[in-house]
Image (cartoon, rainbow, N blue to C red):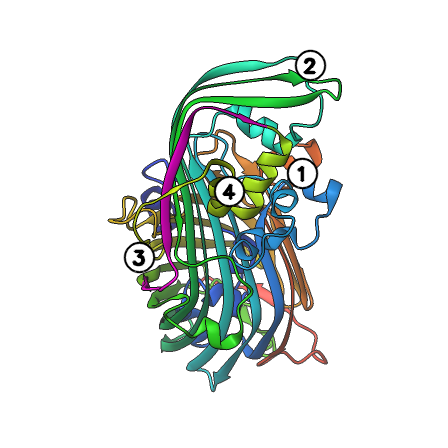
């Protein structure tokens, strides 16, 4: 018990802040989803095999349940492939943060498979499509007007100073091969290690950055539509390749999309065994404390595309209404150039860093199948050399009481997200092959416009040792 609290103090020492698959990444039955954060769990897995049919996890707000935009949860991924209705889709997602930074992300787990070989080795092949939209420097008034539309009448106008701002979008596909091995297997100690190598392709990045002296908005005309006026506005924008719907051969063409390599590595250690098993047919864990550490997304994507472009422009005064706002949201940098013009400013090439992070976690089993889980995730490069081409993610601190069984598990993660003023309380669950979770469950019902992580999916699996014909009995052992 003392060891758990020492480790908890270590992982919570700085003010850190929510992991997108919190329930699945904590569960001993997370399988493929837990291996995404720590591949060591493949060694000695409780699954003989597991197939992820499909899982989507994304930032989400209560607006999604009001408007149900088509494919809204995939907005950061779709931004590189289409310009259709991106404005409407983006309004349903919400930002994970609510201070200066904007953080919108989505990950689509495509069909993936893991296989255990005896009680020692485990292998997995995973395919994921990942996207993120990040930004900073957007005034609260402008965020409100974007979310509620300029053609929706407002009670009064407003104004303020602005300053510098930036927005950027990243998307790529990863194909990952993972291996985990159980190096130590005794009743009181289990030690595992694992690694993942990733091939990254289909990488695309775009950005808009600039500066505004001041802004104002007011109602114009009989329709009640608002007009935003920007003074001393200058911008610079670019993309590694234009928006296009790629074919399979295009994704593998480095002249059209970014490509790279990344890797993950991790270890986990289970200590103690308070529980004596009267029946070996139950695969539930008997450890007192599980400690784990891992690093993820170590690597980079190289953008050497032949169709990259960068340009700049501006205006002493520019008036923007709903049509112009939608043009920028749907078409990104090209939309800005269409509205304001732009002078060539070179190409947009180079190498971008993946969102490298390290993860520490502790999982204490207080009584059979009830755990208290704590995890910390921290950026390894908070200030990358080329920030426009690189991706960073918010730091994370999560504490979650959870119940875990072979057929189902539930958790209530309490999350502290960097850049977010309030703590979020979530709810996650797995029942048979289905899993569903929200990092800000209370906020969805309270009508908060701020986003949180949500995921839903389906997996098929076969457990190694469970014999459902046997009745399971447990009793504590203090040996």
The image quarter in which residue 328 lies:
top right
Question: What residue lies at 56% left-to-right and 62% top-to-bottom?
Answer: 108
Q: Residue 13 occupies which quadrant of the picture?
A: top left
Residue at 60% x, 22% y is: 227
Query: Decide: marks 2, 1 in contact (CB < 8 A)?
Result: no
Tell whether label 3 touches label 2 (CB within 8 Å).
no
Q: Residues within 10 Å of mark 3 (few under 14, many from 20)?
A: many
Mark 1–mark 3 Cα distance, whole angstroms, equals: 40 Å
State whether the magenta stretch is mostly helix, strand or loop. Answer: strand
| 3D distance between C-alphas at marks 1 and 4 | 37 Å
Residue position for label 3: 349
Q: Are marks 1 and 4 in contact (CB under 8 Å)?
A: no
- Residue, far bottom: 118
Describe the element under mark 4 as helix, strand or loop.
Answer: helix
Q: Does residue 356 appear in the picture of this structure? A: yes
Q: Nearer the viewer, mark 2 or mark 4?
A: 4
- Give whichever of discs 1 and 4 has the lower sequence position: 4
Which span is picked out in magenta? 301-320
Label 2 vs label 3, nearer the camera: 3
Dot 2 corresponds to which residue? 155
Q: Count neighbours of disc 2 (C-alpha within 10 A) and say few if under 14, some if 14 to 19, many if 20 or more.
A: few
Q: Point out the image quarter for the C terminus.
A: bottom left
Q: Secondary structure at mark 1?
A: helix
Q: Quick check: 349 above or below 468?
A: above
Q: Secondary structure at mark 3?
A: loop
Magenta residue check for 397: no
Q: Position of residue 283 (x, y in %)?
A: 57, 73
Residue closer to the observer: 385 or 20: 385
């Amino acid at each position: 018990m003392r060891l758990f609290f020492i480790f908890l103090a270590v992982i919570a020492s700085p003010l850190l802040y929510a992991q997108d698959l919190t329930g699945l990444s904590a569960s001993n039955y997370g399988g493929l989803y837990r291996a995404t954060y720590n591949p060591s769990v493949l060694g000695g897995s409780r699954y003989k095999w597991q197939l992820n049919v499909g899982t989507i996890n994304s930032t989400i707000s209560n607006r999604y349940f009001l408007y149900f935009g088509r494919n809204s949860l995939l907005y950061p991924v779709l931004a590189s492939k289409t310009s259709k209705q991106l404005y409407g889709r983006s309004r349903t997602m919400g930002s994970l943060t609510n201070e200066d930074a904007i953080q919108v992300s989505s990950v689509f787990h495509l069909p993936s498979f893991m296989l255990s070989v005896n009680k020692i080795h485990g292998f997995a092949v995973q395919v994921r499509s990942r996207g993120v939209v990040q930004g900073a420097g957007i005034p609260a008034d402008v965020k409100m007007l974007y979310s509620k539309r300029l053609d929706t009448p407002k009670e009064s106008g407003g104004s303020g100073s602005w300053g510098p701002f930036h927005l950027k979008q990243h998307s790529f596909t990863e194909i990952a091969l993972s291996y985990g091995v159980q190096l130590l297997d005794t009743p009181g100690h289990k030690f595992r290690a694992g690694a993942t190598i990733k091939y990254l392709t289909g990488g695309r990045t775009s950005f808009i950055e600039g500066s505004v002296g001041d802004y104002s908005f007011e109602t114009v005309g009989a329709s009640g539509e608002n007009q935003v006026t920007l003074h001393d506005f200058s911008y610079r924008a670019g993309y590694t390749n234009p928006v296009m719907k790629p074919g399979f051969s295009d994704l593998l063409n480095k002249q059209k999309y970014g490509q790279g390599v990344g890797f993950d590595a991790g270890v986990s250690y289970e200590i103690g065994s308070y529980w004596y098993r009267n029946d070996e047919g139950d695969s539930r864990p008997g450890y007192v404390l599980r400690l784990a550490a891992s690093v993820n997304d170590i690597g980079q994507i190289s953008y050497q595309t032949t169709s990259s472009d960068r340009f700049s422009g501006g205006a002493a005064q520019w008036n923007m209404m709903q049509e112009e706002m939608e043009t920028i949201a749907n078409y990104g940098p090209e939309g800005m150039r269409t509205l304001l013009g732009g002078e060539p400013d070179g190409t947009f090439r180079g190498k971008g860093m993946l969102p490298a992070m390290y993860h520490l976690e502790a999982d204490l089993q207080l009584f059979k199948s009830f755990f208290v889980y704590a995890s910390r995730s921290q950026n390894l490069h908070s200030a990358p050399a080329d920030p426009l081409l690189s991706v960073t993610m918010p730091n994370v601190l999560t504490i979650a009481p959870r119940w875990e069984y072979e057929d189902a598990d539930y958790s209530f993660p309490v999350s502290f997200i960097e850049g977010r003023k309030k703590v979020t309380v979530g709810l996650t669950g797995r029942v048979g092959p289905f899993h569903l979770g929200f990092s800000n469950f209370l906020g969805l019902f309270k009508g908060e416009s701020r986003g949180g992580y949500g995921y839903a999916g389906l997996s098929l699996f076969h457990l190694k040792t469970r014999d459902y014909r046997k009745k399971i009995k447990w009793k504590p052992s203090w040996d």
